[in-house]
Image (tube, rainbow, N blue to C red):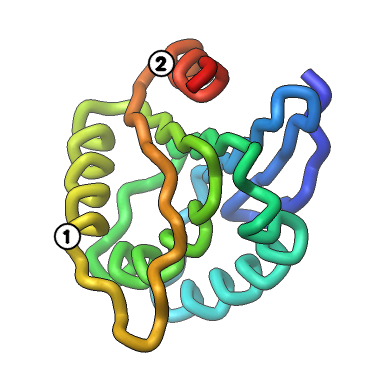
Amino acid sequence: MAYVELIRNPFVILHKDPVRKLVRFRRTDQRLVSDQLATMLEEMMTTYEQLLPIPERATWVLLQDMRDAPILNQSAEATLLRYLPRMVAGFRKRALLLRTAIGLMQARRTLQTLKSQPPRPAEPPPPQPDTGVFDDEALALSYLLAAD
């Protein structure tokens, strides 16, 4: 694999594989501190959107590896959900990779919550990719790299 590292901080490691047109977003096992989360996310999103502008994501797929991520409290989850549509917008496909049955259920619930939220009137919603939820990396990659 020819991964190129784009971002590394205590919470996230972001790589891209230009050959397979795959972005791998790996969440580390570091706990997010709720009162610092919005600032950290805004700083990271600024860099992320410069490196991966939404218009350029259309031919790329996103593997969001959350297997090592600690469970979020409600406050942290609500903050994260405000940034998630921007983070995943524009990708051709997205796969969420989780370790536990609870993680799989939480991811499916979060996806349903995001789908049911009405868009903000001042902002058109960014294009959201089809998303699969997996606990097996090989299946997630197969889903992402399969021809549409």
Q: Amino acid at mark 2?
A: Asp
Residue at x 42% of width, y 30% of height: 97
Taking the image as shown, residue 39 lies to the left or right of residue 132, namely right
Q: Is residue 67 visible?
A: no
In the rendering, which numbered label is found on residue 128?
A: none
Q: Work out which residue is located at the far front of the displayed protein and give it.
A: 148
Q: Is residue 119 visible?
A: yes
Vertical placement of 14 versus 24: above or below? below
Residue 19 position within the rendered picture, expressed as x and y whole percent measured from the top left? 79, 24
Residue density around tag 1, few if under 14, some if 14–19, many if 20 or more, within 10 Å: few
Label whose residue precedes the other's in the sequence (2 or 1): 1
Q: Nearer the viewer, residue 137 or 92?
A: 92
Residue at x 50% of width, y 55% of height: 89
In the rendering, which numbered label is found on residue 136?
A: 2
Q: Indicate the quadrant where residue 14 lies.
A: top right
Q: Amino acid at mark 1?
A: Ser
Vertical placement of 49 versus 42: above or below? above
Residue 126 position within the rendered picture, expressed as x and y whole percent measured from the top left? 45, 64
Residue at x 70% of width, y 51% of height: 56
Q: Which residue is mark 1?
A: 116
Mark 2, mark 1: which one is toward the viewer? Answer: 1
**What SS does tag 2 mark?**
loop
Q: Nearer the viewer, residue 8 or 134?
A: 134
Q: Nearer the viewer, residue 129 or 4?
A: 129
Residue density around tag 2, few if under 14, some if 14–19, many if 20 or more, within 10 Å: few
Q: Measure how far apart labels 2 and 1 are at the Cα level.
A: 27 Å
Taking the image as shown, residue 107 lies to the left or right of residue 19, namely left
Q: Nearer the viewer, residue 68 or 148?
A: 148
Residue 123 position within the rendered picture, expressed as x and y whole percent measured from the top left? 41, 81
